[in-house]
Amino acid sequence: HISGLNQLSLNHQKNVQLLGFDEEQRRKMLLNSESLDLSYCNIWTYQDEEEEDLVLEHYQNYFDGVFVLNISYNLISKVETVQKIIKRFSNLQTLIMNGLRFSNYVLTCSLFPRALKRLSLSNHQTCDVLHLLPENHMFEVLDLSNNNLGELQQSGILEEYLNLSTFHSVELNLSFNDLHFVPHISNTAKHLNISNNQITQRMNAKAQKRAYRNVLSLNIESNKVSHWDDLFELVMVI
């Protein structure tokens, strides 16, 4: 039933089109969908020519109604392309952009809207992904798993290069990052996943311990640590 549709998935499509519906049916389908899945669609660029903009404007009411957008595992290589795409979604609350490979992670302006609550940047496989994050933006969920953040810890300047305390999120996923030390986190983190790393060192900095006292659930499976101090509550997911 088209009028009851609240999620539209077009993943694994080589050519994203809504066929088999007349114009009015397409508009009804789009206008009632709050979640749009465009993962694995071979998207590689965004055409912003005048003619293309007129076509997109035709569906702007639909874009305004989308709260969840998934553009994971496409061929997008430029951050600017993502900026142009998400600019269309004025009420976006959840953005999933896993498995992208940007040629350059340096930003000239903020990438994400201030209203964004949940962000997944998993499996970029580079620590440069941190350059995309706005400082002091409060997320409900932030997924940075599988991004080789441990490479920064091997630089020898741990405090400077892996201080995540300015990235605020209630739920933070740092799993599968080859971390060797306990990361410094924001005191806003309540649910932390640092599983499947190489962590051996226990906490020692006072500021670090204060932040971890706020953690309500902690996943530390598949690490090498043997002793943990100053945790309010420990929940191991095995």
Image (tube, rainbow, N blue to C red):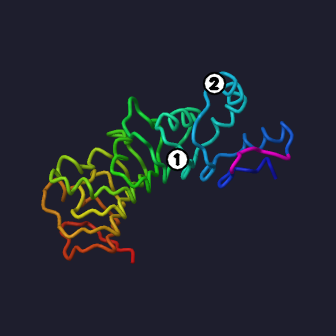
- As shown in the figure, which amino acid type bears the numbered disc 2? Glu
Relative to residue 76, is residue 200 drawn left or right?
Answer: left
Residue 62 falls in image quadrant: top right
User: Residue drawn at (71%, 45%), measured in percent from left and top?
Assistant: 16
Q: With respect to residue 217, does 149 lie above or below?
A: above
Q: Which residues are magenta?
A: 14-20
Which structural element holds mark 2?
loop
- Which badge, 2 or 1, comes first in the chain's sequence? 2
Whole-percent x, y for residue 163 in the image: 23, 49
Residue 196 falls in image quadrant: bottom left
Residue 50 falls in image quadrant: top right
User: Residue drawn at (30%, 71%), measured in percent from left and top?
Assistant: 234
Relative to residue 35, is residue 142 drawn left or right?
Answer: left
Q: With respect to residue 88, does 93 lie above or below?
A: below
Q: Is residue 108 magenta?
A: no
Contact (Cβ within 8 Å) of mark 2 with mark 1? no
